[in-house]
Image (cartoon, helix red, strand yellow):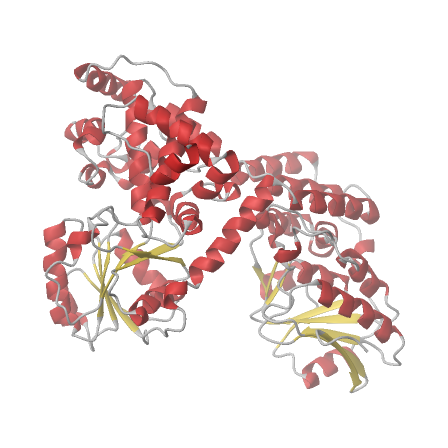
Amino acid sequence: MTGPVVRVEEYGRLAWVTIDNPPVNATSAAVRKGLWDAVRDVATMDVPAAVLRCAGRTFVAGGDIREFDAPPVKPDLPDIVRAIEDCPLPWIAAMHGSAYGGGLEIAMGCAYRVATGGATFALPEVKLGIVPGAGGTQRLPRLVGTKCALEMATTGEPVSAEAFLAAGGLDAILPDLEDRTLTAFALGLTGRPEATRLRRIPAPDPAWWAERESAVKRRAGGQESPLCNFRLVQLASRTPFDTGQSEERSLHLALRQSEQSRALRHIFFAERKAAKPAAIAGHKPRALRSVAIVGSGPAAHGLAEDARTGGLEVILAESAEGLATAAVRPPDLAIVAGVEEPDGMRRTLRRLAEAAGPQAILSVCAGRLDLSRIFEGAPGRNPCLALHCGPVERRTKLLEIMVAPDTPAEVASTGVALARRLSRTPVLSCGGPGIVGGFVGVRLERAVRRQAEDLLTEGALPQEVDAAWAEFGVPMGIFAAEDAAGLEPLDMAPEGTRHRRIRAALVAAGRLGRHSGKGWYRYEPGDPTALPDPEVEAMIREQARKRGIERRRPCAEEICRRLLAVLIDEGARVVEEGVVADGALVDVVAVVGHGFPRWRGGPMYHGTQVGMNRVAGWMDEVVAGSPPGAWTVSDTLREAAA
């Protein structure tokens, strides 16, 4: 028989093949070898069918990413899928949890596919900068049609069992995958369907392909793998299966070594690291059953919606006094969201402590306050956390959790548990004495905004700065994002008067952002398109004249270079100060929360790829072109330049 990660048993008139490779039954070399041997064993059995299923919480949820940097080890997954498809006995894939990547490819090689109602299906390889390697882009359109296959292959997003059944990907949704249920299904089958690879694909017309290619390219934002997946699905509709699979396999192996794939793998592992901070290892979170949220703006309502989705009881009140009236029982966690003025925040926290009770964890969800002052005077009996969800206008999935050095580990662990309940990516940071810059994301954003306004004063226009950043891969430009957020709150940010003179002039002129119809750009009623405005250019020129600056027109490459320099430099300071453990966490904050292109891996990773000594040179350029003391260079970049 086979090794321990794949078991083959015969009973109940069926062959049972079980993959047991925790935690997610990835198609490691051992699993591939076990499946290869299992096909051989099953072929000799005197039974009508074989059932393939997985132990644990999921079906095969993908490949072993750790093998990507090593040469392929035989047997290859395409050969295994083909062997299952050609086996004299029909195989039935019985799926639960996630059937992703190689798991879905294996299932498509089976004659039949069944699943439980909660199962999901995906080809997520595109998110790692690659294409499927075992026929995923070639079998899927033959199974579910071109439209569904193209969406799955180019986005990597999962589809539900119900949607996959409707598209033709499943033969049935079963109530469970117990022996009795699967036996009844298997023994009730008659005949054998045509192998997936042999099925025909109705070919869409050229205009449809052109429209979809344009949409994929626009959504990709510079990432190569979505277009690679698009072309392979298109190839499936035009060529025989063997031709398409050969092309897919070659491209899969080549893209494994691409810069984009390496960057995407870096951020994948960085997010995993962020989800399990070493600082809270071994410390269980407090029980979280209810959360009180004080606030009335988009941030408060967004948190409340996510908390309800995460199964938490939510008490939403516009004020601490309102909470005292609304709460039936004291909450486990109380969050102030939306109050940005420090004194007002402190007063609200004191009232919140009275309303929530001494057992509640007090928290603030504020992006632009000096965190060293927020909890001054807060009742000492309540443990405190500071939370940052990233800019509302970006609709991010980040939850930065800032603690003090003396915050109990169980309280910090509770913050991370909250992130999971909210379906957000946690990043644990420390705001100890002497660290007054605030959240990591806010510091990164502030540095970029400062430099962007410097570029305006020196000669660039808002649309030129945003275009350069977009060309780099950031989906929302700096000034367009400010307009979306509103300029008044930003104008109150503690980032130094010199670096907000133009913004202050816009606010004074009533240009408050998109909601007012004009900010850095102008907007037509009901249309979010940012339109350049000569009035803003005139205001920029006036500010430069007052400061005696002779304007010049920096090129897109210089704009991008200088924005990257200050972003990487600030990230380096964050690590130097001990706010986060390492640069990988800075990358998570920038990518998940602030729009840095995922396929570039994050600013710190990008800096290592271009060379930190080179980035130091870019930062020297920023310093040299600014008034004395306006910018300084981090120790990390100084050492890199030495």
Nearer-the-camera pick, 579 or 553: 579
Whether residue 414 is situated above or below residue 534 in the rendered picture: below
Snapshot quadrant of residue 113: bottom right
Left or right, residue 522 beside residue 559: left
Whether residue 181 is situated above or below residue 29 in the rendered picture: below
Question: Which residue: 9% across, 59% down?
Answer: 347
Nearer-the-camera pick, 144 or 17: 17
Nearer-the-camera pick, 275 or 619: 619
Number of numbered callouts drawn:
0
Nearer-the-camera pick, 615 or 84: 615
Name the quadrant of the N terminus.
bottom right
Answer yes or no: is residue 522 visible.
no
Snapshot quadrant of residue 231: top right
Question: Which residue: 13% across, 51% down?
Answer: 342
Question: Which residue: 24% across, 46% down?
Answer: 437
**Residue 634 position in % (x across, y down):** 33, 38
Answer yes or no: is residue 604 visible.
yes
**Residue 589 position in % (x across, y down):** 39, 49
Whether residue 224 is situated above or below residue 88 in the rendered picture: above
* Outermost residue toward the front in this view: 642
**Residue 108 position in % (x across, y down):** 73, 61
**Residue 541 position in % (x across, y down):** 24, 16
Left or right, residue 6 beside residue 148: right
Name the quadrant of the C terminus.
top left
